[in-house]
Image: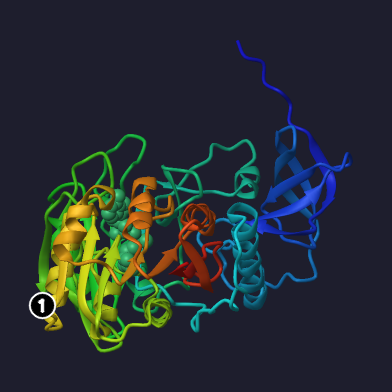
Amino acid sequence: MARKHKKTVINALRLERYAAEGKSIAHLEDGKTILVEGAVPGDIAEVMVMKNKKNYAEGKALKIVTPSPDRVTPFCDHFGICGGCKWQMLPYDKQLEYKQIQVTDQLTRIGHIDLPPIEPIAGSAQQQYYRNKLEFTFSTQEYLTREEIAAAGDAEIERKPALGFHAPGMFDKVVDIKTCYLQQEPTNKIKNLLRDLAFRHDLPFYDHRQQQGWLRNVIIRIATTGEVMVNLIVQHQREELKMILDTLLQEVPEITSLHYTINPKLNDTINDLKVETYSGKGYIEEYLEEFRFKISPKSFFQTNTRQAEELYRITRDFAGLTGQEVVYDLYCGTGSIGIFLSKGAKKIIGIELIADAIEDAKLNAEWNGLEHCRFYAGDVADIATDAFFEEHGRPDVIITDPPRAGMHEKLVQQLLRMRAPRVVYVSCNPATQARDLQLLDEAYKVIRLQPVDMFPHTHHIENVALLELR
Ligand SMILES: C[S@@+](CC[C@H](N)C(=O)[O-])C[C@H]1O[C@@H](n2cnc3c(N)ncnc32)[C@H](O)[C@@H]1O
């Protein structure tokens, strides 16, 4: 049997500076660098060493011994338990400072290429209620803190059913959320009403271990137009469903599109299921500047609407369109960047893996009367071939907005062959962006860099890069 090593605990370690992904840097007695999660620069923390490698170590703060002078009181009662807003203990300007440091560090440390000065990060005007979509989970198992478990003493711990967010790293336990500051009202009203109804009528919450129960999830989407969409997900048909949906309509008149989904599967994804419309028009409408988008229950849409507009304005500014350009929108999702840039382009060609998203993109182009936008479903590494570019026109500008893993190397090689005069690279992970910029360096020079914060109080960061052919 493998023997378990006892992990070393350091009683008081001073965190010196910010690294990335919520981790800060400190030094062990022998001078070795340690990356610590769960603490911020300026804290003195009790740290458990989780990994001790030859050149560096990784650790986790167990306790803050002396808090950093930067710390402020978090505004949410669930802070520290709910995994949602990990940086609420930092003032927003500090969060932005650390995000800027992360982008600078990763681009210089990983990229090793000539860079222009990085422009100051574009902060989010809204730091609360900035999300347009939230999903809450029902569970028979409320998450309890160590203190709550200790308070129970020898008595058997009884966990109540809960409605909220999964506790970090736990598939079965849910933090019961009373008030969430991520999405405007009537979100909390809807969530709390559903919980009350479930308790009042003794309706079974879903048991994620046994994989049985009735109430599973609720997804709430709110557009800046004021329209509210609710999708209640249950395991099977049951007569109380009508009562719940009718009560929602009665008590929350703001709801404009009410849905339910029967999910008998073992996993939570609803993309392969039929979403039923119980009341309303079946979708909500959202605007980015003057462009109108249809959001159906399964559509993808950027979750911070106002900041998505900012991100797209920066992308449009970097693209520098004059009305004459053939523009490719790679990893286009529902076509929102291409549509947003469409007025300045001769032609927009979008490529995206998810076929449903491409259907939404086509519909969005039609809604906006854009006849020069074309969208294609498939893996961009396979679709964007020489023949594809030949058929649709040589690119003047390529926009690329890949997922966190960055661009497929085959696509990077294709971009090097295509030699579009401009590439605008929108990234949600500066580390993989740095890797790709290094690969593109033989043909492209980085001209501008602009970090953007889409998710206040989290460690996430977007970065937009403008590349020009050398
Ligand atoms: C960061 S999102 C960008 C979406 C869109 N540009 C927007 O702003 O809403 C990345 C997109 O890439 C898509 N994707 C992931 N892998 C892909 C691939 N190999 N080929 C094409 N699209 C892919 C995902 O489905 C997702 O829609």
In this picture, residue 74 sits left or right of residue 353:
right
Q: Secondary structure at mark 1?
A: helix
Query: Does residue 87 appear in the picture of this structure?
Result: no
Q: Amino acid at mark 1?
A: Glu
Q: Tell me if I can see residue 63 in this picture.
A: yes
Figure quadrant, ligand 1: bottom left
Lateral position of residue 227 relative to residue 95, left or right: left
**Which residue of the protein is positioned furthest toward the front in this rendering?**
470
Number of disc labels: 1
Q: Residue furthest top?
A: 1
Residue at which label 1 appears: 366
Tell me what residue is drawn at x 66 percent, y 72 percent: 97
Residue at image location 16% in from the left, 55% down from the top: 355
Which of 424/2 is in front?
424
- Compared with 73, 198 (above or below) is above
Residue 32: x and y in percent read 81, 41
Instruction: State the image coordinates of residue 115 (x, y, percent, origin top left).
Output: 60, 67
Q: Quadrant of the N terminus?
A: top right
Say whether residue 285 is left or right of residue 31: left
Q: Is residue 113 left or right of residue 228?
A: right
Q: Is residue 288 above or below residue 96?
A: below
